[in-house]
Image (tube, helix red, strand yellow):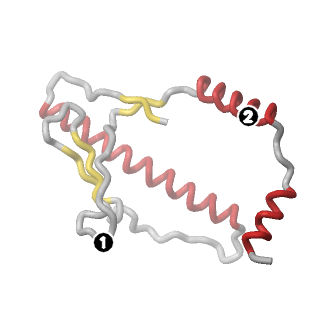
């Protein structure tokens, strides 16, 4: 018996949801999406960097939403300098929580920095105009 046939047998023994249960899950997801509060941001869609080892890898550009040629750049590698401390006996759930909390904090700092740069740009280059908003997930 190969590893593939072992997996196939295991999957075959797992309980399969009925068609009614599958449709109920799809409907619940659709309703949850309709009920979610839209989140809006002034941060435009970023221009993603080339992959490592390209010299420009890690540099994410946020261009002006009005297309004036200005952009704000964030070096995603350079902004992560703090060491990560994980207890030796941490469970996988605790390790996941530590990394998730760190990512949330780091994301908030980057978001604030990008929003400030965009607001400063609009105040200087597009006087009297507010940055356009877009909906994000």
Q: In which quarter of the image is the N terminus?
A: bottom right
- Residue 107 is situated, as x and y percent measured from the top left of the image, at 44, 50
Q: Distance between the Cα atoms at labels 1 and 2?
A: 42 Å
Of tags 1 and 2, which is closer to the observer?
A: 2
**Does residue 91 appear left or right of residue 37 in this picture?**
right
Taking 71 as reference, is 86 above or below it? below
> Does dot 1 land on a helix, a strand or a loop?
loop
- Residue 18 or 36: which is nearer the viewer? 18
**Does residue 22 appear left or right of residue 125 in this picture?**
right
- Residue 73 is situated, as x and y percent measured from the top left of the image, at 24, 52
Q: Quadrant of residue 97?
A: bottom right
What residue sits right under mark 1 in the picture? 53
Taking 137 as reference, is 50 above or below it? below
Give the residue displayed 20% in from the left and 31% down from the top. 66
* Residue 25, numbered circle: 2
Give the residue displayed 20% in from the left and 23% down from the top. 129
């Amino acid at each position: 018996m190969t590893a593939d046939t072992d997996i196939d047998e295991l999957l075959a023994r797992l309980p399969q949801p009925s068609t009614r249960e599958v449709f109920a899950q799809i409907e619940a997801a659709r309703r949850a999406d309709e009920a979610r509060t839209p989140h809006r941001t002034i941060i435009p869609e970023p221009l993603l960097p080339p992959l490592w080892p390209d010299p420009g890898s890690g540099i994410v550009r946020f261009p002006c939403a009005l297309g004036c040629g200005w952009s704000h750049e964030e070096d995603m590698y350079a902004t992560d300098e703090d060491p990560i401390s994980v207890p030796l006996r941490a469970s996988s759930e605790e390790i996941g929580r530590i990394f998730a909390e760190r990512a949330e904090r780091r994301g908030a700092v980057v978001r604030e920095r990008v929003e400030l740069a965009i607001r400063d740009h609009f105040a200087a280059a597009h006087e009297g105009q507010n940055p356009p908003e877009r909906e994000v997930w």
